[in-house]
Amino acid sequence: MRMYQIVKFKDQSAYATFWGCDWNCVYCIWKKEKWNLCLPQKVKDELEERWRKNEIEFLEIDRIIKILKDNEIKMLFMGGGEPTLDPQLKPLLIAMKDIGIKSWIITNAENIDDEIFELADGFTMSLKAFDRETHIKLTGHSNEKVLENFKKFASSPKVVAESVYSKGFIECEEIMKIAEFLKSINPKMRFRIDAEVGQNLDEKVSECVEKTRSILPNTYKIGSGTGGEAPDLLYP
Ligand code: SF4
């Protein structure tokens, strides 16, 4: 597979990182930092050194399942990179289902198909811009397929929609257009607005969450993620 990192959190969930994405979002964190942001800098530096020396392998399904079982993982979040580009994703989801480990996929929503949607337990589907031209400027890709997939899948309670507030690109006006679109699919949809990392946008995002709730009541943001406890590194 293209999975090269797994970290474990206190609640017995884990986060696996996949290599590769064919989009080029201007704010992509993964393209700047391939190691989990919650890991201490010293650990990330060591991993980077091992990566340079070619000491880190992509994991095979059997090994992933063993790591998850040995560490009593109940839920695996999968992000990256773009997990849906991995041809082995479906067999992994099947293997996890067989032993009762839940799966949650964080995706740009372009490549989800019926089978992936059936197999996984939850999705964070990103809608980076509603306006087509803005989407192309931001990601290098059209959002045509993404919008189709939202119409097809996002009325399910398995889905949380997500957008990134990005100064000068995706501000509250665009976020509210996204919310209108989401409302047309499911007025109860959960919609998470994230602040672009490192841009001090917490206050702007809070204001925008308030405004957007007039369209989609289940709009929220999560904390900035600083100050939390570092996860355990299960691989490498
Ligand atoms: S879709 Fe996600 S992983 Fe791909 S470039 Fe954009 S932010 Fe990065």
Image (spheres, rainbow, N blue to C red):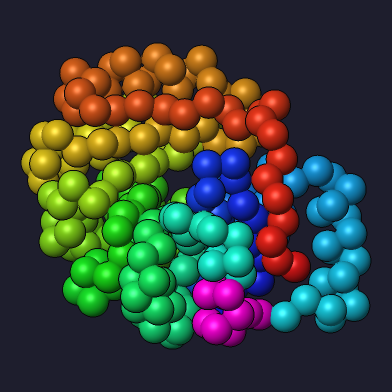
Give how far across and how far down residue 205 sits, in percent: 45, 23
Q: Is residue 63 above or below residue 203?
A: below
Quarter of the image that includes the C terminus: bottom right
Left or right: 107 in relation to 82: left
Give how far across and how far down residue 11 sits, in percent: 52, 42
At 35% from the left and 26% from the top, the residue drawn is 220
Left or right: 100 in relation to 3: left
Q: Quadrant of residue 107?
A: bottom left
How many labels sit on residues? 0
Give how far across and how far down residue 74 sits, in percent: 45, 55
Give how far across and how far down residue 163 sits, in percent: 39, 41
Q: Main secondary structure of the magenta part?
A: helix
Residue 17 vs residue 169, the one in the foreground? 17
Q: Is residue 93 magenta?
A: no
At 87% from the left and 70% from the top, the residue drawn is 50
At 88% from the left and 55% from the top, the residue drawn is 45
Q: Quadrant of residue 70?
A: bottom right
Quarter of the image that includes the N terminus: bottom right
- The stretch of residues the image draws in magenta is 58-66
Residue 125 vs residue 95, the one in the foreground? 95
The answer to whether one can see residue 37 in this image is no
Q: Is residue 25 above or below residue 230?
A: below
At 26% from the left and 49% from the top, the residue drawn is 159
Left or right: 175 in relation to 140: left
Q: Is residue 65 magenta?
A: yes
The answer to whether one can see residue 152 in this image is yes
Left or right: 69 in relation to 183: right
Residue 130 vs residue 31, the one in the foreground? 31
